[in-house]
Image (tube, grey):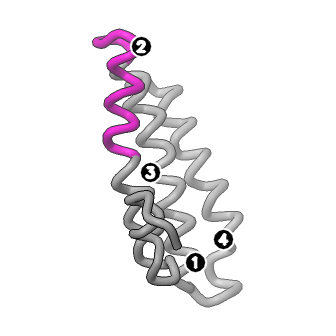
Amino acid sequence: MGPNRIFELLLGFTSVLVTLRPGFVEFHLTSGLILVSAFTGASAVVTGKGLLRAECAEQTVFYLTLFAVPFALMPTLYFGNGQAWKYCLGWPP
């Protein structure tokens, strides 16, 4: 990772912090979720670029989907109205 990439990473993280405005408002759960979302989005991009150097495009899409689905499924099941697992299994409501 070169100096340009590190600078871009720091600039992106700084822009997320400016958006959150720490010190002006108190820290909420949603602020933490924004930071987690920014981190996971950036790590997905970096992982995808790394995989494309080593694997073919089909395998890269498979691996990214394989790791993304559980992370998307967890909040869906947690914040759902208790019926989300039925939709995931294809059961009628």
- In space, the residues marked 2 and 3 are separated at their CA atoms by 21 Å
Q: Which residue is drawn at 43% across and 39% down?
A: 44
- In space, the residues marked 4 and 2 are separated at their CA atoms by 35 Å
Q: Could you tell which of marks 2 and 3 lies nearer the N-terminus?
A: 3
Mark 4, residue position: 20
Magenta stretch: dominant SS? helix
The magenta stretch spans residue 74 = no
Q: Tell me the amino acid under the disc marked 4.
A: Leu
Dot 3 alpha-carbon crowd within 10 angstroms: few under 14, some 14 to 19, many 20 or more: some
For label 4, the SS is helix
- In space, the residues marked 3 and 1 are separated at their CA atoms by 15 Å
Q: Could you tell which of marks 4 and 2 lies nearer the N-terminus?
A: 4
Q: Could you tell which of marks 4 and 1 lies nearer the N-terminus?
A: 4
Q: Tell me the amino acid under the disc marked 2.
A: Ala
Mark 3, residue position: 40
Dot 4 alpha-carbon crowd within 10 angstroms: few under 14, some 14 to 19, many 20 or more: some
